Image (cartoon, grey):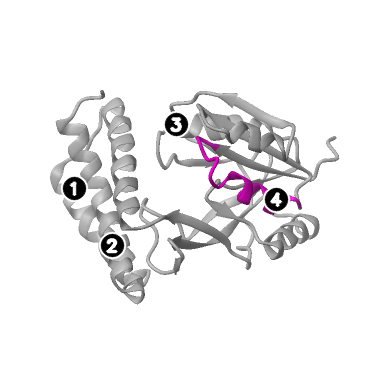
Amino acid sequence: MTDIQISALISVHNEEAQLADCLEGLNFADEIVVLLDKCTDASGDIARKFTKHVIEGSWSIEGDRRNAGIEACRGKWIFEIDADERASIELGQEIIKVITENDFDWHEILVDNYIGDRLIRWGWGASYGKAAYPGLFKRGVKVWGNARVHPPLFWSKGAVKGPKLTNRIRHYVDRDISDMICRLDSYSTARAIDLRQSGHIGSMSNNLRRFFSRFFKCYILRKGYREGGYGFLVALFAGLFPILSYLKAKLEDDN
């Protein structure tokens, strides 16, 4: 049996500008595992200042990359975080308390998303952003599916979800509106490749419906309207994601 209770896992691609800030908040973990995916910058040098558990490789599928990181963890529990996210002291303390005092198998962590320095709390979801994510789980209960962007999750039979944690992770998701647009373009391009390879790209009519339903869900049901123009953009891009992915899959090549 391992005596490592919790592993903090982060997978990165050329994140030298913010990797150290992320890793500095993980000192509550018994081990830190950093997976370097096709990194050509100083990410590796930065990671090795914080941990000996550094894995280098090249993955074209996000699900495969994340699964490789999970397999490298030795802890009973795994805390999954990205380079543009920050764990507070309070969140670290809560994680230690949760894994010590309960018998659940996984927990969601609430997310505070920032665009630049502005907190945008309302309206996220529908494959464009996350209001919460299943980032704390026992080793062996969570497997990522085979996709380049937003891979599905599969849970082991009988895995029991616990309550959401109360302390939030800070997610510096975009620098500005231009960055939001670039992310939409990148996500939809990756999704288009997955659609083409699946052989089921869908239909224009179905994706038009999804545009309106996703916009309504983010702007109205998830209260994006409370964020003014930023909330409108989040809802708009959430609606555009499936239809852009469909059009790229139908009209463009894999080059």
CB contact under 8 Å: marks 3 and 4? no
Query: Is 26 left, or right, of 142 in this rendering?
Result: right
Give the amino acid type for the residue marked by disc 2 in the picture: Leu
Q: Residues within 10 Å of mark 3 (few under 14, many from 20)?
A: some
Q: Nearer the viewer, residue 176 or 62?
A: 176
Position of 121 relative to 23 (above/below):
below
Helix, strand, or loop for circle 1? helix
The stretch of residues the image draws in magenta is 12-27
Mark 3 or 1, closer to the camera? 3
Residue 13 falls inside the magenta stretch: yes
Give the amino acid type for the residue marked by disc 3 in the picture: Asn
Residue 23 picture location, percent across and down? 66, 47
Give the amino acid type for the residue marked by disc 4 in the picture: Leu
- On the image, numbered disc 4 is attached to which residue? 26
Query: Is 48 left, or right, of 250 in this rendering?
Result: right
Mark 3 or 4, closer to the camera? 4
Mark 1 or 2, closer to the camera? 2
Q: Quadrant of residue 78?
A: top right
Residue at 75 percent of width and 48 percent of height = 29
> In the rendered structure, which disc, 3 or 4, sits on the residue that comes first in sequence?
4
- On the image, numbered disc 3 is attached to which residue? 146
